[in-house]
Image (cartoon, rainbow, N blue to C red):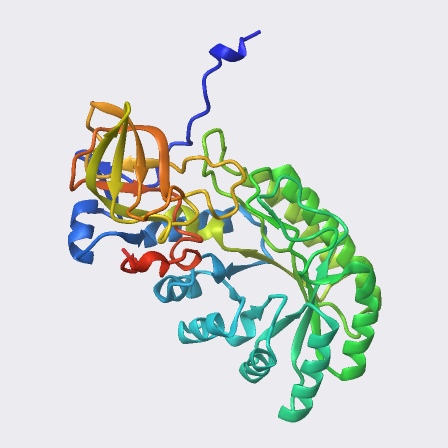
Amino acid sequence: MTNSATRTPPVHVPMTHFAEVNGELMINRLPLSRVAARVGQTPFYAYDRSIIQRRVAKLRAALPNGIKLHYAMKANPMPAVVSLMAELVDGIDVASAGELKVALDAGANPHEISFAGPGKRDTELRQSVAAGILVNIESFREAGVLAAISEELGYPARVAVRVNPEFELKGSGMKMGGGPKPFGVDAERVPQLLKEIGAAGLEFEGFHLFAGSQNLKAEAICEAQQKSWALARRLADYTPSPVRLLNLGGGFGIPYFPGDQRLELETIGDNLSDLVERTANEMPQAQIVLELGRYLVGEAGIYVTRVIDRKESRGLTYLVVDGGLNHNLSASGNFGQVLRKNYPVTIGNRMDNQTRETVSIVGPLCTPLDLLADRITLPKAEIGDLVVIFQSGAYGASASPQGFLGHPPVLEVVV
């Protein structure tokens, strides 16, 4: 038996999706330093379109025919990213009227746009009905408001019911279902809601079930998909019209921290093949939808910030950079982490430097929370070098407090 004191500590999964040439990180065949010069300033986010394209293609190859793929744009709502995704996937899922505008401007088909969120304003519901998109109803109030809007506009709202199941997605970073939740309608109350939807003459299309997010365990995802499908099948006995859509959510995770392993797709593909077959037999008009955000774009993005100072403090070297938690809240550990862990990091213009050092990387903000990497071993960096934080394509710029302490906003580019 290996003694715990001598056990090898976990390491990050290799970040091999970006190439390296002559010690410099490449972004879609361009050296990082050239991209930085093109952007004109640091910090910035760069999203590699070729990595996004490969990720979508790999996922489609693993999925059975008959599965629709939707992009949950809350993961990264940058307009250029959404425009790219609109060309690659079957639909876009939005969480506000602001996101709806971006999706429509990007050329997404309104019939393949859906809107989820627990606090939809009346004005947002009216915009949704006018645009002809699908609204995932999350309360009895929303059904009543949509009925009034449909009568006013003269055509029925397209709706699905977001269901809060009685189970959770095991091993999820964030649990979106099971127990008391602000999301969706408790499964036991859905039959009554369906009755009201039918009485109001709304255009019912199906169900939305999203049990959790950021899961790296294929078996847990498969179990949640099976349970979600079974719940939807039971609820189908109460629907005012046949189920045409079954959104099983997503939950597919990416490896952020030491010890994380990449999600295995083959098991999930086999599971979905079974569900497609059962759907054809028991809900023949229904089509299964997967709603993914982080998994499609998270690994394609990097956050790039420049070293502006090196400081020694009682035996520890600090690299002070020009961006921090105001731009990348997730990497600082202040966006859902219980115990802070380092994202994968490198010195993007010195990757072949054999001289290594253990450093902590901090931003320019006057708070101890502004920590981007804690005691991490990297190629030795000098003032002016470029620090790269991988796995930054999702929940980055839009999920960070960019106005905090008055520092400049971050730029974003698709390369």
**Residue drawn at x 24%, y 39% as measured from the top left:** 348
What quarter of the picture does the C terminus occupy? bottom left
**Residue drawn at x 31%, y 37% as measured from the top left:** 361
Side of 256 where 67 appears, left or right: right
Side of 29 where 142 appears, left or right: right
Of residues 294 and 117, which is closer to you in this image?
117
- Which of the 4 image quadrants contains residue 88? bottom left
Q: Which residue extends farthest top?
A: 1
- The x and y percentages for residue 209 are 67, 57
- Which of the 4 image quadrants contains residue 342? top left
Side of 168 where 215 appears, left or right: left
What quarter of the picture does the N terminus occupy? top right
Disc tally is: 0
**Residue drawn at x 65%, y 37% as measured from the top left:** 219
Side of 381 where 279 appears, left or right: right
Residue 242, can we see it? yes
- The x and y percentages for residue 396 are 40, 53
- The x and y percentages for residue 9 are 45, 20
Residue 15, can we see it? no
**332 w.r.t. 8: above or below:** below
**313 w.r.t. 128: above or below:** above
Of residues 89 and 375, which is closer to you in this image?
375
**237 w.r.t. 173: above or below:** below
- Which of the 4 image quadrants contains residue 246? bottom right
- The x and y percentages for residue 42 are 22, 52
Of residues 380 and 132, which is closer to you in this image?
380
Of residues 39 and 25, which is closer to you in this image?
39
